[in-house]
C-alpha cells in the first residue's frame, strides 16, 4: 500500500504560514539586496567548495514586487522534518518581516554532498510529491508578505515548472558530524513566479516575481535511520496531552502519542518505544512500537476498573542506558 505523504498545496501553505517555527534570532539587515544575477549551466558531480569566504554569514534575502530585504540568520538552528524516507524539509518564519522560508533536500548526507553546483533545478513547491526528483536537488523558496510584518497577504510561489521557477545551488560545504547527522553549509539563489494571495479569503490576485539568495545550515543523515549502533536517542516527549479521563474498562478516544528526539531536537525514526501499564490494571494496544519518520508512535489505552491509572513510555539508548520515561495518567470517572 502506498504511504500517504504530506501534499503541499496553497491550502496547506496557509496552515504552515500560521503554524511555522518563528526565527526569533533573525533580524532585518540593511542594505536590501540588489537584483539577483542569474546563473545557469553546470552539471557534473559536486566538488565541495573549500573556500571560506563569507562562510560565517547565514541569511536569506528576497526581492518581491513591492519591497526587498536581507534577513540575518546567523543564530538560526532548526531541526528538519521528513515527509518520506528520502526527503527532509524545514520551514520557518521571520518574526520581524513575517516572510516564510522553505527548504527541502535529500535525507542522506552522501546524496547531499553530490548535488551539482550552478545547475538550475526546478522548484518543487509540492516537494513531498516529488521526493524522487529531490534525490539530486535542493528546493528553496520564500513566501513573502505584500508588506513587511503584515501576514494578511502573501506572494506565494506557483506550482508550475516554468523557466523562472528554480533553485540554483552555488555552494555545499561539509562542516562536521555527530554520531548520526552531518552538518552542511548550503548557499544558492532562487526565483519563483508567485501569486498575491489573501490569507483570509484565499483569493488569488496579481502575478509577480520573488527572487533572492540564501546561505543556511542544514542537517542530513549520515546513515540509514535506526540501523547503526551509534544511533542514541536522547529524550522522549508527549505529542499531545499526558492526562486523561475516561470510563472504567473503556478505551480512551485519544491515543497516547510520543516523539523521540536527539540533543538538537531532531526526531528519530525506527526507535523502539516500550509501553508499560504501571497502575490501574488497564492495558495498551501494543507493548512495543516503532517511531515513524517524524519520530512519532502511538498506542491506544484501555483503562482499568477503578482508581488512578498510569502508563509509562520508555526508550533506551543503544548502550542500554535508560532515558527518563514519559508518564501518562488517567482518572476513571
Image: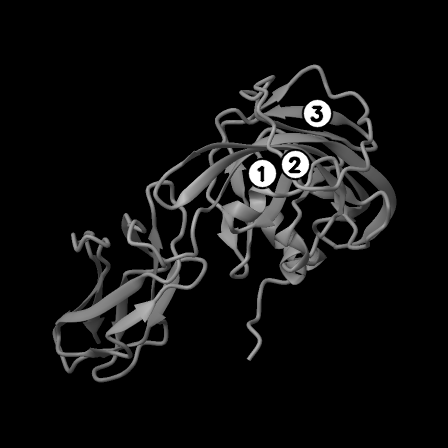
User: Is disc 2 in contact with disc 1, using a CB cutoff of under 8 Å?
Assistant: yes
Q: CA distance from mark 2 to mark 3?
A: 10 Å
Q: Is residue 85 left or right of residue 288?
A: right
Q: Is residue 10 left or right of residue 111?
A: right
Q: Please name whichever residue, 310 or 33, is drawn nearer the observer in this view of the structure.
A: 33
**Which type of secondary structure does the marked residue at label 1 adopt?**
strand
Q: Is residue 264 above or below residue 261?
A: above
**Which type of secondary structure does the marked residue at label 3 adopt?**
strand
- Going by the picture, which residue comes out furthest to the top? 31
Comes first in the chain, label 2 or label 1: 1
Q: Is residue 90 left or right of residue 264?
A: right
Which residue is at 36% across, 39% downward?
178
Q: Is residue 20 above or below residue 60?
A: below
| Among the 4 quarters of the image, the one containing residue 259 | bottom left
Crowding at dot 2, Cα within 10 Å, few <14 / some 14-19 / many 20+, comes out as many
Image coordinates of residue 265 in percent, x first then y, are: 38, 44
User: Is disc 2 in contact with disc 3, using a CB cutoff of under 8 Å?
Assistant: yes
Q: Please name whichever residue, 321 or 241, is drawn nearer the observer in this view of the structure.
A: 321
Label number found at residue 99: 2
Crowding at dot 3, Cα within 10 Å, few <14 / some 14-19 / many 20+, comes out as many
| Among the 4 quarters of the image, the one containing residue 247 | bottom left
**The C terminus, quarter of image:** bottom left
Image coordinates of residue 49 in percent, x first then y, are: 61, 28
Comes first in the chain, label 2 or label 3: 3
The residue tagged 1 is: 93
Q: CA distance from mark 1 to mark 3?
A: 14 Å
Which residue is at 12% across, 74% downward?
307
Q: CA distance from mark 2 to mark 1?
A: 6 Å
Tell me, yes or no, if residue 91 can be seen here: no
Amino acid at each position: 500500500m502506498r504511504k500517504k505523504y504530506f501534499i503541499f498545496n496553497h491550502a496547506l501553505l496557509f496552515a504552515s504560514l500560521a503554524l511555522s517555527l518563528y526565527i526569533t534570532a533573525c533580524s532585518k539587515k540593511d542594505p536590501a539586496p540588489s537584483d539577483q544575477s542569474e546563473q545557469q549551466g553546470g552539471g557534473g558531480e559536486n566538488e565541495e567548495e573549500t573556500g571560506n569566504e563569507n562562510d560565517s554569514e547565514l541569511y536569506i534575502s528576497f526581492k518581491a514586487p513591492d519591497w526587498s530585504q536581507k534577513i540575518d540568520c546567523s543564530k538560526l538552528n532548526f531541526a528538519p522534518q521528513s515527509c518520506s524516507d528520502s526527503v527532509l524539509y524545514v520551514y520557518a518564519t521571520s518574526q520581524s518581516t513575517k516572510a516564510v522560508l522553505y527548504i527541502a533536500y535529500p535525507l542522506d548526507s552522501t546524496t547531499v554532498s553530490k548535488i551539482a553546483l550552478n545547475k538550475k533545478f526546478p522548484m518543487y513547491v509540492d516537494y513531498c510529491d516529488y521526493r524522487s526528483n529531490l534525490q539530486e536537488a535542493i528546493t528553496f523558496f520564500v513566501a513573502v508578505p505584500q508588506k513587511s510584518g503584515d501576514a494578511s497577504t502573501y506572494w506565494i510561489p506557483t506550482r508550475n515548472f516554468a523557466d523562472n521557477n528554480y533553485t540554483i545551488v552555488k555552494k555545499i560545504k561539509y562542516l562536521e558530524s555527530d554520531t548520526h547527522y552531518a552538518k552542511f553549509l548550503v548557499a544558492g539563489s532562487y526565483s519563483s513566479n508567485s501569486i498575491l494571495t489573501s490569507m483570509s479569503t484565499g483569493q488569488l490576485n496579481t502575478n509577480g516575481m520573488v527572487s533572492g539568495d540564501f546561505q543556511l545550515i542544514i542537517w542530513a543523515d549520515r546513515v540509514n535511520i535506526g540501523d547503526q549502533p551509534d544511533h542514541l536517542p536522547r529524550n522522549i516527549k508527549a505529542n499531545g496531552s499526558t492526562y486523561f479521563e475516561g470510563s472504567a474498562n473503556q478505551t480512551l478516544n485519544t491515543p497516547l502519542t510520543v516523539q523521540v528526539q536527539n540533543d538538537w531536537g531532531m526526531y528519530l525514526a525506527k526507535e523502539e518505544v516500550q509501553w508499560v501499564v504501571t497502575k490501574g490494571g488497564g492495558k495498551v494496544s501494543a507493548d512495543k512500537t516503532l517511531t515513524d519518520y517524524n519520530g512519532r508512535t502511538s498506542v491506544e489505552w484501555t483503562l482499568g476498573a477503578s482508581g488512578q491509572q498510569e502508563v509509562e513510555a520508555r526508550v533506551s539508548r543503544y548502550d542500554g542506558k535508560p532515558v527518563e520515561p514519559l508518564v501518562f495518567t488517567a482518572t476513571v470517572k
